[in-house]
Amino acid sequence: MSDQKLVIEYDDQTVRMFMMASIFWGIVGMLVGVIVAAQLNFHFLNFDTSWLTFGRLRPLHTNAVIFAFVGNMMFAGVYHSTQRLVKARTGSDLLSKIHFWGWQLIIVSAALTLPLGYTRGKEYAELIWPINIAVALIWVVFAINFFLTLAKRNEKSLYVAIWFYIATIVTVAMLYIVNHLSIPTSLLHSYPIFGGVQDALVQWWYGHNAVAFFLTTPILGIMYYYMPKAADRPVYSYRLSVVHFWSLVFIYIWAGPHHLLYTALPGWLQQLGMIFSLMLWAPSWGGMLNGLLTLRGAWDKLRTDPVLKFFAAGVTFYGMATFEGPLLSIRSVNALAHYTDWIIGHVHAGTLGWNGFMAAGLFYFLAPRLYNTKLYSVSWANMHFWLGLVGILLYVASMWVSGITQGLMLNNADEQGILAYPNFLETLQSIRPLMLTRVVGGALYLAGFILMAANIWMTVKSGKAVNGVCEVADTEEEGKKLGLIGAIVHPAFLYSAGLIVFSCVWLFGEGFVELIGMGLTIVVVMSCIVHFARSGDSFAAWYDKLIENSMPFTVLVLLSAAVGGVVQIVPLVNIDKASVAEDKIQQVYTPLELAGRDIYITEGCYNCHSQMVRPFVAEVKRYGEYSRLGESIYDHPYQWGSRRTGPDLARLGGKYNDDWHYDHMLDPRLTSPGSNMPNYPWLFEKMTDYGSLPSKINAQKMLGVPWPDWSPAEIDSAAKAQARAIKENLEARGKEVDQDAQIVALIAYLQQLGKSDAVVEEVASK
Amino acid sequence: MSKQPTEEKIRAHTFDGIQEYDKSLPNWWLFTLYATIVFAVAYWVYYQKADIGMTQEQELEAALAQVDEAVAKAKAEAGVLDNDTFAVMAKDAGIVSAGETVYKQTCASCHGQNLEGGIGLPLNDAEWKHGSEPLAMKKIVEEGVAAAGMPPWGPVLGDQKVNQVVAFLVSKQVK
């Protein structure tokens, strides 16, 4: 032991690079957002060009803003604050470089493949399988680098921001890997291993928690470091940090099914989704409170400091969005809001308000410090704030009005079940002015963001890159380590785990098991109270010890985040498909229909069309019988959709004739005056890829889809025979078409939608 | 850090200069948390344990039963619509123009702005494949012709609009 001082130089170059990347991709992602918003109102902006069409650009927008903009921003914040919070330079400079360049390479490959139509057809999980593997690998690099940093830390204890970073790293890895499990059929194409209802559940377990653990927890960590720093005030309540952190990590995971309310998802899962969303309200607000109340005594600084101004507004939007979330998950509210713009508005309150403003605050904080200078212009930053704020308000308010308007119109059926607005397009026309307002709001927000980019650029030019340093005492402090066993074999953990396990047994068990679960839950609660009251054991002491030990801490985070997924997903994955099909089971596609379905996915039709008729009078009258679980059970990926810019397609098959579809895909306004759907002229020129069908069908067979045992030649001739029949049918009606054109396969698929077999009683009872 | 009211407990440890108060949780916040948990358990018991709450399929069934009842009642009150009634309606300018609006919105994209046909059959000639009587026409509008790709419009439009559009067609009919 010696009391020599060691000087540590932080690696701030990585931070600077991530910051610049985030700003650059932010502009790209938001620009694409403004373009796709404009396309919804002016269909000619699709330019009759496949790679500029809404269905392909919208995934580019969502992936760019989530993974490129917020991803890079998060990495900048994590790398900068973690080094300072643990008083150590990042684990490995090489890993930092691999992380940075690997991530940018992933983004570039996403930006190339998505417009070209290479997609997995699942929202925010569109990237094709080779890129998925790259994402997982780079994420592991990030994780190793992060935990290496913790390992060489000169700070015994882990601050709350680090807890949130740990939760982000382990949970995103879990979610991403499970939702991207696929069987490749070629270098660029794969089918997800889950199908139908299982795929839907896994998708929203992932989708909802991408919001939780990619867009929320890392940003909360960033808030916990930069808010008290910028305000120069202590964090409001440590205790609140502990309680809201653990409740957030535990509860968030369960809430995914609220994206599937009133669908064919089994009722118990829907109800879990709703009640856990409601229970999420307080834990979310715990974060908001700790952020806003940290500003006590510093509110006057908001007037002068753009950093705090953005942080305060960002956290307020977080509070608003996390109140709106539980509200929207109430089943009766969701009945109105689901599939409408209200959801779009809700998401953007979170992303523009919370993510975007926290990013702006972070960058205004970082830039002057990383370049040892002053912010170039505070008035530009203020201008950015007001442009952004007005932009968000216009955006969110117009989407509220649009969503509620269209939801009310579509659900409006009188006592005789007669629809007040039988024509779907009527409801579209009524929201057009609101869609236009949204474009204006988004453009204002983008303008503000570009102003920030210019401001940061000028700031960077006025200064010189410097790396932060800190001095630490070179002492080897040998505290007693708390291993995993030590962390678990402690009343604090045992009682918590017992409470969770036994209450699950009680709530999910039946009969005798249920009673035992209830009894044990009560016993655990009582003995826990008695134990902590009597013995000297203290929860706080255990926890203080736990946060000095990153390994057991990380394991406990992973465990608590895993519970919800295990309880929800495992039972549904293990079901016998035929037995849960309710009274209808999907017919297996023909080869041509499968080819058509893959075209449907390539064109991103799911971005605007659902395939899920909800059990409401208005929907049953408009679209036909409500959708059964069995009707999409063989769909890899599922295509239930999340937004109805156009009508539901679950029962489209046989509704119109082939000519109708021919005209409609050529120019939707020929059959549907006033439609905002793009034209798809290339479907009439590009040829269907028959060659890949055998390997696709083979992959589906491995996944349990009951395809007949066909040879590749049989598959080919079956596909071509069906194509010929459709072509002849079209030609008889005076429509010229190449038999092998994609439109033929797509028509085959569209005409099959909703075709199912009745489930025979014996199968059902098995 | 600048001012620190003495009564506020602050944790001894700091992280990169960041201090933390250890304030107790706000009561209203705790109440919200507990209230949502209690509600969650009650909701679960109501739907899953006690089986009191209806499933979404049962909800739909009940709603559709009410609709059927209302439709039956309305039909009984309206009396029997026969071919002659449509002949009378076809002379009522109000009904015909309402029917024309429905036609333009719903039918024109396939049957043509001027009934000349297109994706669907023409309606301005003397040929009526499925019968030229108003009631036969009504049946087609309501139930569609699956083989020809004509959708059933009865559930979407409802009885009144179907009658209007049939009256409109009768008014234009070439015998």
Image (spheres, helix red, strand yellow):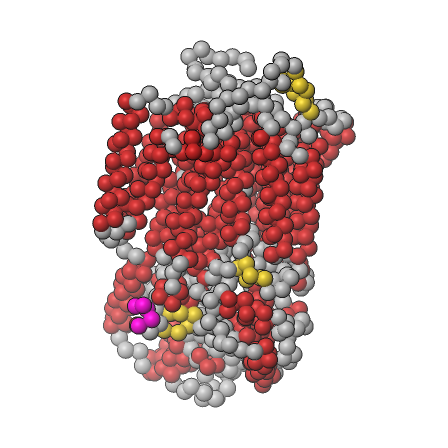
x%, y% of residue A546?
46, 28
Relative depth, front residue between A710 and B52: A710
Quarter containing the N terminus of chain A: top right
Residue B126 placement, left or right of B63: right
**On the rendered structure, is A298 left or right of A90?**
left
Residue B103 vs A348, above or below: the answer is below
**Main SS, magenta residues:** helix
Choose between A411 and B40: the one closer to the eye. B40
Tell which residue pokes out farthest to the top in this image.
B6
Percent position of residue B138, x then y: 38, 79
- Residue at 72%, 35% (x, y): give it: A454
Name the quadrant containing residue A251: top left
Residue A481 coordinates in the image, percent (x, y): 49, 26
Q: Is residue A349 visible?
A: no
The front one of B164 and B155 is: B155
> As displayed, is residue A411 above or below residue A107?
below
Quadrant of the rendering where the C terminus of chain A is positioned: bottom left
Residue shown at 50% from the left, 37% from the top: A167
A310 with respect to A252 (left or right): right
Relative to A130, is A203 on the left or the right?
left
Q: Is residue A765 magenta?
A: yes
Magenta stretch: includes residue B144: no
Extent of the magenta region: A762-766
